[in-house]
Amino acid sequence: MLSTLAMLLGGLLVVAGTVIALFGGLFVIFVPQLIIGGLFLMIGLAIERWRYKSIAHAAPDPRWKDTGERFVDPETGVLTAVYFDAASGERHYLAANPK
């Protein structure tokens, strides 16, 4: 919810900067700050959504090794298990099955 509102705010900043640039006026000095700030906000949120994926509920790949780490995901409240892929160095987060 918050990231959606921040994305909308970034879009509004870019639109406001574009409108001010087109029509000029007293506030034309703020155009670079509005457009660049809005773009930074939108690009940062897009990277965050791409980078931080939700927890998968699938079975682990056989190449992944269980690290023994368990934690409760603060966003979803799901008990999460951490797996390590030695070939790529990636960490994978899967919903842990309660034992």
Image (cartoon, grey):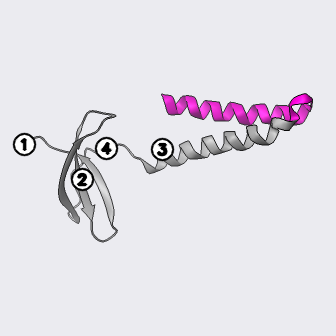
- Amino acid of disc 3: Arg
Q: How far apart are marks 3 and 1 (CA)?
A: 31 Å
Q: Residue furthest left?
A: 99
Q: What element carries label 3?
A: helix
Specify which label sits upstream in the sequence, 1 or 4: 4
Tell me the tag on residue 49: 3
Few, some or many residues within 10 Å of mark 3 (<14, 14–19, 20+):
few
Residue at left offset 73%, top offset 37%: 14
Tell me if residue 91 is in the magenta stretch.
no
Q: Residue 48, how many percent across, how many down?
A: 49, 46
Q: Distance between the residues labelled 2 and 3?
A: 20 Å
Tell me the tag on residue 99: 1
- Residue wearing tag 4: 55
| Residue nearest the viewer, comparing 94 with 31 | 31
Labelled pair 2, 4 in contact (Cβ < 8 Å): no
| Residue nearest the viewer, comparing 43 with 61 | 43
Q: Give the range drawn in magenta.
A: 1-28
Specify which label sits upstream in the sequence, 2 or 3: 3
- Residue wearing tag 2: 82
- Amino acid of disc 4: Ile
Q: Residue 49, how many percent across, how many down?
A: 48, 44
